[in-house]
Structure formats: C-alpha cells, structure tokens
Image (tube, rainbow, N blue to C red):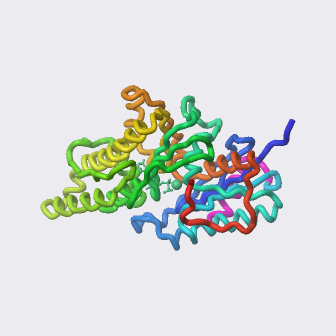
Amino acid sequence: MSKSVILLGIESSCDDTAAAILKDGKLLANIVANQDIHKQYGGVVPELASRAHQQNIIPVVHQAILKAGINKEDINAIAFTRGPGLMGSLLVGTSFAKAFAMGLNIPLIEVNHMQAHILAHFITSPDLPKGEERQPEFPFLCLTVSGGHTQIVLVKDHFDMTVLGETIDDAAGEAFDKAAKIMNLPYPGGPLIDKYAALGNPLTFKFTKPQLPELNFSFSGLKTGFMNFINKETSKNPNFVTENLNDICASIQHTIIEILMDKLKKAALQTGIQHIAIAGGVSANSGLRKELLKNEELLGWKVFIPAFQYCTDNAAMIAMTGYLKFLKKDFTTQATTPSARYSIA
Ligand code: KG4
Ligand code: ZN
C-alpha cells in the first residue's frame, strides 16, 4: 500500500487566519480565527489585518495539528494562499509556509484563493450531511461571489478554468457590506442583511439594476442609488431604517441576487452548460441558495452548493487544492512571493 499524504493548508489572504489538515484528501481539522477588530471600521483595515494574522497564525496551526491528532513531523507538504488578496495579509501566510516547509524539509505548494473557493466543492469530510458531499461534474459554471471578487468561471477541469465575466467595480460581497454600512450595521454586513431579509418583503423597495453588456457585473451604481435612497428617506423620517429594516434588507438582497442570477442564466444559455455551482462568502446567502435551487426544476439545472463552513474563507479549500496539486507534483520553490492580483487563468 502507498504511504498516506498529510497536508497542512494555510489561508491568510484577507481577514481570516485559517489552517486545515487533510489526510489523503479527507479533512481532519479546519480552524478559522476571525478578526473582530474590523467590525468597528465597517470594512477590513489592511494594516490591522496583517498584525492580527501575525498574532493568530501559530495558535491556529497549533490547534489544527492538535485537532487532527497528528504530530507536525507527520505533515508531508504545506499549501498556502499566494493570492489574490491583501499584500500584508498574504505575506504572513506565505512567510510562515516557507519557513515551516524549510524547517521540516517538505514540499511547498502555492494556491490561488479564487481557484480554491471553487475547488472547495471537492472537500470530503465526515461532518458533511447527506447531499452536501455531492461534487460537481465537469464542465460546470461557477459563480464565485466573495468580498473581493465576483466572477462567472467556466470550469473544465480542476485546473482548467476560464473567467467568462467579472465585476468591473465592486464585488457582490462589497455591495452587501456597503449597504449594511449605510444602514449603520457592523462589518461584515452580508450575514446580517441575510438574517433580516428573511423576515422582510423583497418587493417593498425598488432599486435600479445596472445594464452591462456580456457577462460582466457592476455594483457601484447600486451602492450609490441605495445611499441616495436611504439619505432621502431618513431626512424625512430619522427612524426610517430601524422601522423598515427587514423590508430594506429583503429588497436590496433581492436586487443583488437578481443581478447575479440574470448573468448566470445568460452564461448557462451561451455555453449550454447546466451544471451550476456557487462559491465564495456570498454563496452562504440563503436567498441566493434558494433562487439557484428553484432553477433545478424551472430550467433543468443541476445545482452544486458548498457546505456553509466552506463558503467563507477557510483553509480546508486551500488544503484540498494543495492536495490536487500534490498528486500532480506541482510544487513551488522558496523563491515564491505573494501575488495580490494572482489570476486563475
Ligand atoms: O469569501 P469571503 O469569506 O472572503 C473574501 O474572499 O472576500 O467572503 C466574504 C464576503 C463578505 O462580503 C460577507 O459580507 C459575505 O461574503 N457574506 C455574505 C453572507 N455570508 C458572508 N453575504 C451575503 N449573505 C451571507 N449569508
Ligand atoms: Zn475568499
């Protein structure tokens, strides 16, 4: 029998410090330390994120090793996020991974964060409920929606991906977070809008959707329109937001989902592909998940939705991508440096 492969994955591209241990493709530990410090600023403060990563990285890796029940000497390779992301944040994970690999004399594997969000679909873990372990079949389309990116990706194979369309300004997650900030909700606003939206009427308020050609997205106009709307209404009634919070959240969430779904349907029509996946932090949104699943019946789509814990930033997806690269012996050298704008092409 061939020897088992134990892999450590490290994620530090934005404001989550994460470590995961994967044995022969199966997840043994998945630890994420969120950084509460950004809450009060309404968004991620890069300098504070780098400092928090520096504080968190050793305890997070230590906890992952303990949870997995292994010794650090058992680890056969280390995978880390090389980009895209915030340079200061990426530097912490990259430096840690390089030093760790050198200390243990094991291979180093660089991972693209956006590719990893998509490959999160291939994580197998004993804690996944029935149905959620279903993996997409190639080729499939993936709507990758996070705080930093919004893309429709044609995925022909694990490492054969083409971006068919992307945002020309804000990301979908940013649209959620900025709308929340305008309503004085703390960062990250996406999960809160999702929560209040479930109690509101999505058709109460109408917002203008962008008219962009092809498969590209734009969210900055929606943000400005939303800000003007809130300013106008609160000048008439200072309690407008608190009195209408559920309906406002439901309406803005409905508009963001419509913008995403319009383009996804267009991409499915253009490519003739009906295997549709979502990935990234915004794929945790319950409204988006519901809307996608509706199309299994309406349009004959086969829909793939990652488990909640693998939607937002995590290291399980980095370890999974690292494992697939390990099998191809796709290693990197100690000369590697982070890439803030690392493309998946
Ligand atoms: O993938 P992710 O954890 O980090 C990036 O790579 O950006 O995504 C974070 C984004 C944030 O904008 C957050 O507000 C959004 O995902 N998000 C959500 C939900 N959960 C996280 N947006 C809408 N509904 C949610 N339930
Ligand atoms: Zn992400």
**Residue at left offset 72%, top offset 47%:** 68
Q: Residue furthest right?
A: 1
User: Can residue 55 be seen?
Assistant: no
Q: Quadrant of residue 109?
A: bottom right
Horizontal relation, residue 219 to residue 229: left or right: right
Q: Nearer the viewer, residue 280 or 32?
A: 280
Q: Residue furthest left?
A: 236
**What secondary structure characterizes most of the magenta part?**
helix
> Percent from the top left, x then y, of residue 156?
57, 41
The verdict on residue 49 being magenta is no
**Residue at left offset 32%, top offset 44%:** 258
**Residue at left offset 57%, top offset 61%:** 342
Q: Nearer the viewer, residue 306 or 195?
A: 306
Give the quarter of the figure containing the C terminus. bottom right
User: Can residue 333 be seen?
Assistant: yes
Horizontal relation, residue 229 to residue 261: left or right: left
> Percent from the top left, x then y, of residue 319?
67, 50
Give the magenta-colored segment's residue range.
Answer: 54-71
- Seen in the picture, residue 334 relative to 118 is either above or below; the reply is below
Give the quarter of the figure containing the N terminus. top right
The verdict on residue 62 being magenta is yes
